[in-house]
Image (tube, rainbow, N blue to C red):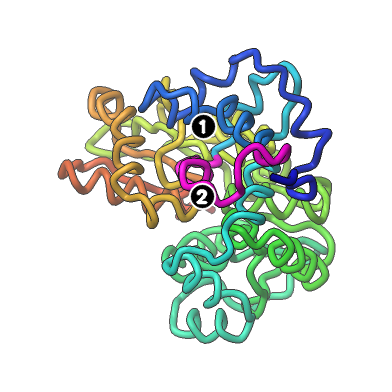
Amino acid sequence: MTGQTGIFDAETLNACIGCGYCLPTCPTYRLTGDEASSPRGRITLMRAIQAGEIELGDPAAMEQSQECLACRACEPVCPAGVQYGSLIEQWRDAGWKRMPIKVFAAAAAVRRTWTLRLGAAVVPHARTHRGDNDTHLMLGCFERILFPKVSRSVQQTYPDISVDPNQGCCGALHAHNGELQTGEDMARQLGDDLPGTIVTTAGGCAAHLASVIGRERVVELSEYAASHPPKRKLSQITRNGRVARIAIQDSCHLRNGLGVADTIRFLVSRMGTLVDLRTAGDCCGAAGSYSLLRPEAAHRVFDAKRNEISDSDLDVIVVVNPGCYRQLKTELAVGASDIEVLHLAELIAESTADQP
């Protein structure tokens, strides 16, 4: 066999020292207890592929590239600073000769701006507005269709932010699912179309966009709100005759990739009673397209936090990513839970509504 030396960045791949700190943070390792289903185990497979010891298309190796949630929970705890997220994207870029049909259809639908505009034409998301500064709201491709109230809520709270309804997709879906170059090209195009600062409401998109056009240009909504307090003061919201008990489901890419978590908690604590769940930073199972491709596995991942949510006497769970939004609404509906799922943008809009 010949080594596949062009697949992985050698420096990144060789940075792993095999310490195993990543194992307890990995959702799939916690579920299976299988070393191969951990970041360390998958890096071992990557090294074997790079050295030509196993084929890129080896079924067991391919299964591991697909089983990984790419949540990057291993990165913050890694003493060697291994950028595992980059490695898993490189693996999929080389090994997935064709995306799974569900993902292929979704990626194709948003690859061209005109098809995205057509799909969102009748959806009541935020519309054309030229603000007073060089700051733009990224609508998100599926978020604007599935959860249009998110962008409207941002526009309600921050009317000075510019909104271009003709903007395209950032390419995160493509980069995470085997079309790395396409994803990077789409991110650069969006950066050109929205010059200046880009405010995001989708954690996965924020991490991808920042990796391509620069962190200095990408500001997640909680960061923006913390540094640009709404003109109307944040006030506490109520549910069931009490100050709302609010928990947070972190976005994996936002927390592990960009390190954004504290600003979300700072804001939520001003709008209700913050209940900081032990599992708040653990993946909910959405993981981009993961819950579409592996729904049973995604369900098992969520089960790890289901009891804590049920036992915490919550009124609201706040999300900062559309995939998490859909996953939590779906999973909580299974148990007939009356816990409300809201995006942070919607919570802020409610908190500041009806004030002078």
Question: Badge 1 is on which residue?
Answer: 270
Q: Is residue 304 above or below residue 349?
A: above
**N-terminal-most mark, 1 or 2:** 1
Which quadrant of the rendered structure holds the N terminus? Answer: top right
Residue 136, picture quadrant: bottom right
Residue count near mark 2 (Cα–Cα under 10 Å), binned few <14, some 14–19, many ≥20: many
In the rendered image, residue 11, in percent from the top left (x then y), is placed at 83, 33
Camera-side residue: 220 or 226? 220
Give the extent of the magenta segment: 49-70
In the rendered image, residue 19, in percent from the top left (x then y), is placed at 65, 13
In the rendered image, residue 272, in percent from the top left (x then y), is placed at 42, 32
Camera-side residue: 41 or 254? 41
Count of numbered badges drawn on the protein: 2
- Image point (28%, 32%), residue name: 303
- Image point (65%, 35%), residue name: 48
The label shown at residue 321 is: 2
* Relative side of 276 to 255, left or right: left
- Is 273 magenta? The answer is no
Of the residues shown, which amino acid type is indicated by label 2? Asn
SS for callout 2: loop
Q: Is residue 348 above or below residue 107?
A: above
